[in-house]
Image (cartoon, rainbow, N blue to C red):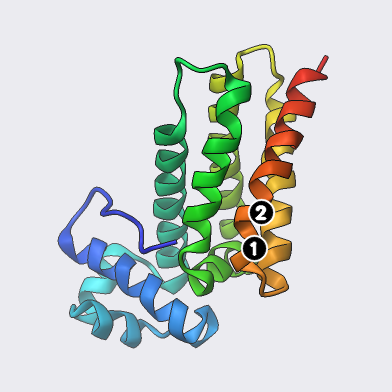
Amino acid sequence: MNAPAPTPGSDHRRRLLDAMARTVASKGFAGVTIADLAAEARVSRRSFYEHFTDKSACLVALYEAASRQSLQVLREAIDPTQDWHAQVERALAAYFGLLACNPPLLRTLFIDIIALGPEGWAARRRATAQLADLIVQVVGPGLPSAQAVAIVGGIHEWVLEAVEQDRVDTLAALAAPAARLVRVVVDHHG
């Protein structure tokens, strides 16, 4: 996963998010300091604090930007002229491809976000809800939201396992089983 596309806001904010992506990729979230972020973004510490209360808030903003980027990749991979069964594997392949682009950043976005506690959990739940909403939009409103959330949770557990086992390079192989999971849950909901 590359650094997320620019988000609404100032150039300093975008540069700080890019700096967070680069520094966590090289140092890990625990090793990143505000001074590191300011230096990497070529802004003052004061500028950092104009946009974020602390490095955790910056990480949450990066997570949310990366989630928006992932959602956009999924939307672009969806062809509404095709039956959803035919397009789900293509969309998941694009999603896994994006996730695999930057393994150190992926580790931060899947593991360090949880370590933030309630703030990170809330960001993760919002992202999960957005992905679940997209699933419901694609397959139809008959799918209960809770089942769409379960699909996202199951897929993300596979991704988390790959991250923890340093197997991010195998994420593409998850497209077919993840597509089967989606089809089975959707076809058998009720």
Residue at screen point 27% across, 72% down: 48
Say if residue 136 shows up in the picture. no
178 vs 39: above or below: above
**Classed neighbour count for the residue bearing mark 1: other residues with Cα under 10 Å, few (<14), some (14–19), many (≥20):** some
Q: How far apart are marks 2 and 1 (CA)?
A: 6 Å
Tell me the element at label 1.
Answer: helix
Q: Position of residue 108 (x, y in %)?
A: 54, 70
Contact (CB < 8 A) between labels 2 and 1?
Answer: yes
24 vs 116: above or below: below
Q: Is residue 86 left or right of residue 10?
A: right
Q: Is residue 151 left or right of residue 1?
A: right
Q: Position of residue 68 (x, y in %)?
A: 41, 45
Q: Which of these two is toward me, 165 or 86?
A: 86
Residue at screen point 36% across, 63% down: 3
The amino acid on which the numbered mark 1 sits, given as a three-letter code, is Thr
67 vs 22: above or below: above
The amino acid on which the numbered mark 2 sits, given as a three-letter code, is Ala
Q: In which quadrant is the N terminus drawn?
A: bottom left
Q: Where is residue 106 in the image (x, y as percent from the top left)?
A: 53, 65
Residue at screen point 78% across, 27% down: 185
Q: In which quadrant is the C terminus drawn?
A: top right
Residue 173's disc number: 2
Tell me the element at label 2.
Answer: helix
